[in-house]
Amino acid sequence: MQWEIFDKLVQKLEDHCKCVLIGNEIDYRRLIAQRSIEQAHYYWPLDSKSKQMFEDMWSEITKKYGGNVTSETVQVMFGRTLEVPQSCNGVARFTFEYLCGRPIGAADYIAIANNYHTVFITDIPVMSMRIRDKARRFITLIDELYNRHCCLYCSAEASIDDLFQGTEEGTLFDMESFQFETEIEGGRLRRDVLAEGGISSGGSPTGIISMLSGQEELFAFRRAVSRLIEMQSRVYLDAARYLHPYFQSSHGNLQQISSAN
């Protein structure tokens, strides 16, 4: 991205257009979620009661979609595949460690979000600097699920508001050592996007990543919290039934999934 060109554009817009400031401390996603009667999609803490409620919900949802839980293989970008240990007609279940504790990235999460309208994630820990790479992946995962209108069920160690507050090992926001994307993953995804759009990349991926300031990273965490809250709301859940790619495909099944019992 050519920052000088973009900066000149912003100056021109400010000179010739009326500017409306929308930045404030109000989280409108939270306001919407607070009006929702049903918010049983996020279960915490990781005690026996919450775990049982989570398991009951898994049984209820899979039964609704046929009840035949199998493993599946999903096609991912760059010729790769991803194994889905538990799935049932558009419903998938993973552990946090399986999705965020391994070297996978946005391309894998996009494949999951495209193929599964409902995703269950178990054993989500409180994020800290010790697991900062997992936290980064988790935020990318939430972004992709949200962007494709997935219904999300979570079992977690703490509430949504406390999930990114850190532990006794330290807070998550060590801006010097934390990066929202690694250079490898960021460069690969940007090359793919630029090639698809027919746009010249200009600077190097490293140069682009260096522009991500600590404030932008902090914003990414806050946005993840806000999105997790909105994903509990009735408005979001009702829209997901119509907007998710799974329901817009023929017979509700995307062709890139192959079953493996």
Image (tube, rainbow, N blue to C red):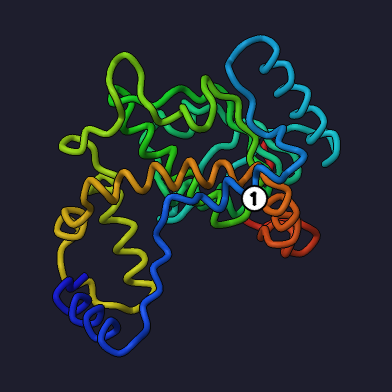
Kindly indicate the quadrant of the structure image that contains residue 120: top right
- Vertical order, 18 against 241 (above or below): below
The spot of residue 79 in percent (x, y) is 44, 54
| Residue 153 on image: x %, y % | 65, 35
- Disc 1 residue crowd, few under 14, some 14–19, many 20+, Cα 10 Å: some
Left or right of 52? Residue 127 is: left
Q: Position of residue 208 (x, y in %)?
A: 20, 60
The image quarter in which residue 187 lies? bottom left
Screen quadrant of the N terminus? bottom left
Name the residue rendered at 25%, 86% in the picture: 15
Q: Residue at x 21, y 54 (%)?
A: 209
Residue 258 can be seen, yes or no: no
Name the residue tied to disc 1. Answer: 32
* Secondary element at image label 1: helix
Q: Give the side of residue 36 with respect to residue 63, left or right.
A: left
Give residue 77's position: percent from left, percent from top: 45, 55
Q: Amino acid at mark 1?
A: Ile
**Looking at the picture, does residue 148 appear above or below residue 37?**
below
What residue lies at 30% left-to-right and 46% top-to-bottom? 217
**Figure quadrant of the C terminus:** top right
